[in-house]
Image: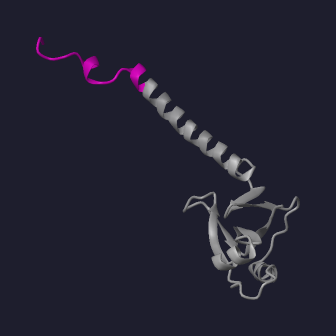
Amino acid sequence: MLGTPPDRDRTPSRGRRAVGALAAVALVLGVIGAASVAYHRAYGTWWQTPQRISFCDRTYVASPSPVLLTRAEVESRAGSLWAIKDVDRTLRTVATVPPLPVVGKPVLAVVAPPLARQEKGLPCAMALYLQMGADRYVAFLLSD
């Protein structure tokens, strides 16, 4: 038995396993905490429907008592917001909230062409529409 190491040298001690497990839990909690703080800074809420969305260097805000709209209502509103005639009124997905491909909810907008924005001083979009569910959207209007 002189040539074989004791069993306790081959496997990590109970204390080392506990420290490793605590480190893993702390890492997960740190990532969740950092994501929560980032979400709050970006949208003004803690993992709820945003109070605001930033897009194209502008801020869009939700009304204090938001109304759920259908896609048809969104298309009707989006088309009527632009006073100029040369804007393509097609709704496009311009972002997701949060900006993650799997869990992010689409944000739709009618986006003014760059030339019209430069020549006429227009914002990228007059309103954003956050999809809340199947055929359900909340409007976010351009803030002052």
Up-down relation of residue 82 to residue 14 (above or below): below
Q: Does 7 appear in magenta?
A: yes
Toward the top, the furthest residue is: 2
Residue 139, image quadrant: bottom right
Up-down relation of residue 5 to residue 72 (above or below): above
Q: Does 29 appear in magenta?
A: no
Which is nearer the eye, 103 or 119?
119
From the top left corner, tell me how far across and down residue 117 is, in percent.
Answer: 70, 74
Q: Answer left or right for 140 relative to 14.
A: right
Which is nearer the eye, 16 or 74?
74
**Quadrant where the image shows the C terminus:** bottom right
From the top left corner, tell me how far across and down residue 98 is, in percent.
Answer: 63, 57
**Quadrant where the image shows the N terminus:** top left
Residue 3, image quadrant: top left
Up-down relation of residue 52 to residue 137 (above or below): above
Please tell me which residue is depicted at 86% across the width and 62% down the height of the picture. 63
From the top left corner, tell me how far across and down residue 6 is, in percent.
Answer: 22, 15
Total marks shown come to 0
Up-down relation of residue 135 to residue 132 (above or below): below
From the top left corner, tell me how far across and down residue 59 is, in percent.
Answer: 75, 59
Q: How is the image coloured?
A: one colour
Q: Is residue 86 visible?
A: yes
Q: Which residues are magenta?
A: 1-17
Toward the front, the furthest residue is: 119
Q: Is residue 110 visible?
A: no
